[in-house]
Amino acid sequence: MKRLFWLGVGVATGVALTRKAGKTARQATPAGLASNLGDAVSELAGAIGSFGADVRAGMSEREQELRDVVEQRTATPRAAEGRHAAVARPRPARARRAES
């Protein structure tokens, strides 16, 4: 009975090591490396996009706080919402030509 038990343990260990070696060998191929690299790049792109969204949200929140402080201190209501709404600048000639 002991021999049968150890035979089973040996077979199970052999199967597990064979599968592990096959998986490692597949990852070492060019296709496996490209897949790993593609996954890493997509994960990095997602993290960068998330960071950008957090930065934009923080900027918007801080801009609103600053506008509120300016409105409170000057006691004048804001004329228009939006970025640089009070400043109306003419477009450069380049931009006008590009639109035509």
Image (spheres, rainbow, N blue to C red):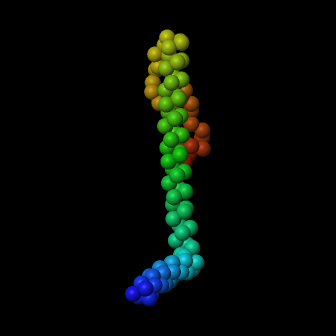
Count of numbered labels shown in the rendering = 0
> Residue sitting at 49 percent across and 31 percent down?
61
> Residue sitting at 55 percent across and 26 percent down?
87
Could you tell me residue 81's position as x and y percent?
A: 45, 27
Quadrant hosting residue 12: bottom left
> Residue sitting at 46 percent across and 16 percent down?
77
Residue 49, visible in the rendered structure: yes
Could you say which is closer to the camera, residue 75 or residue 94?
75
Q: Is residue 2 above or below residue 84?
A: below
Could you tell me residue 34's position as x and y percent?
A: 55, 72
> Residue sitting at 51 percent across and 24 percent down?
65
Task: Determine whether, in the image, residue 92 is placed left or right of residue 76.
Answer: right
Could you tell me residue 78's position as x and y percent?
A: 47, 19
Could you say which is closer to the camera, residue 41 or residue 60?
41
Could you tell me residue 75's position as x and y percent?
A: 49, 11
Could you say which is closer to the camera, residue 90 or residue 28?
28
